[in-house]
Amino acid sequence: MLALLKFAQETEYFKSFEEFYIPMIKKSYSIYPKLMTIVSSIAVGCESTNDINEKLHPEALAANILEMERFPNQSQINRFLKRTEEKSIVQLQKFHHEIFMRHSDSLSSDEETVVDFDQTGLIANGKTYEFSSKGYFTKKKNQLGYQVSAAFAGNHSETISLHLDPGNTHCQDRIDDLLYATISKFKEQLNNRKLIIRTDSGYGSMHSIEKLKNIKNLLFVTKGYSTR
């Protein structure tokens, strides 16, 4: 984690986060350190904010790299997360786009760029999981959970877009969002006919196929629609 944070500071990798705003009273920490605490918690393998106090809070040297004496504790991060709203998501999507455009290996490659659209289910049956709902989960019946929709450039292991929705969300409900995120990042590849979108049969309805066909210079591979 130390190497990651040092690299991030030297390259200003997460500088866009400094612009993030939510209406919150500053006490011990401003917003940027709290965002970087979340990034750091992922880097050290925290599965939830419950792990922050044990795995991250004692890491004083890592906190010093971010110009903090200590990382915020779990309760401070939870309060921060509870204050986020839809406008916060829009800001984070903007920051992700800026970081991607500055640092993506896919954008600098001369090869064709293949972007996979996919959806996978996450089972979450506990009462504390907000907005989880019954839906289709492979080989699992009568389960509650979420659907994760993603656009992913596998050659360079880069996530282009990611959405978490209730379990009853169909993959085609997110195709417009995935398309927008992909095309806005790969405009040059699209103009040069070097952008290929690949989907499974869940996205293979005639409506979705026509949508893909109507995008000039876009190449795509999909299977015909199937509920199986």
Image: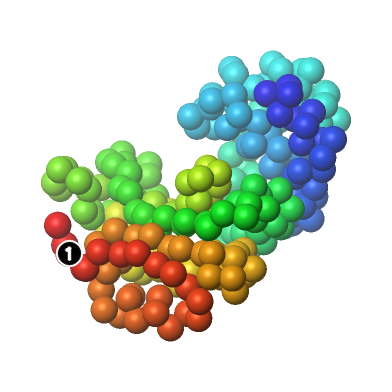
Q: Position of residue 49 (x, y in %)?
A: 54, 32
Q: Is residue 88 visible?
A: no
* Relative to 4, 136 lies left or right: left
* Relative to 48, 71 lies left or right: right
Q: Residue type at mark 1?
A: Ser
- State the scheme by which the image is colored: rainbow
Q: Position of residue 111 (x, y in %)?
A: 57, 54
Q: Is residue 61 visible?
A: yes
Residue pictured at 50% horizontal, 76% vertical: 217
Q: Nearer the viewer, residue 94 or 22?
A: 94
The residue identified by callout 1 is 226
Task: Identify the secondary structure beneath mark 1.
Answer: loop
Q: Nearer the viewer, residue 216 or 78?
A: 216
Q: Position of residue 103 (x, y in %)?
A: 71, 48
8 over 186 or under it: above or below? above
* Relative to 127, 9 lies left or right: right
124 over 86 or under it: above or below? above
Q: Quadrant of residue 30?
A: top right
Q: Quadrant of the C terminus?
A: bottom left
Residue pictured at 21% horizontal, 68% vertical: 225
Q: Position of residue 23 (x, y in %)?
A: 72, 57
206 over 86 or under it: above or below? below
Residue pictured at 55% horizontal, 44% vertical: 156
Q: Residues within 10 Å of mark 1 (few under 14, many from 20)?
A: few
Residue pictured at 37% horizontal, 42% vertical: 128
Q: Quadrant of the N terminus?
A: top right
Q: Quadrant of residue 41?
A: top right
Q: Nearer the viewer, residue 138 or 63?
A: 138
* Relative to 24, 46 lies left or right: left
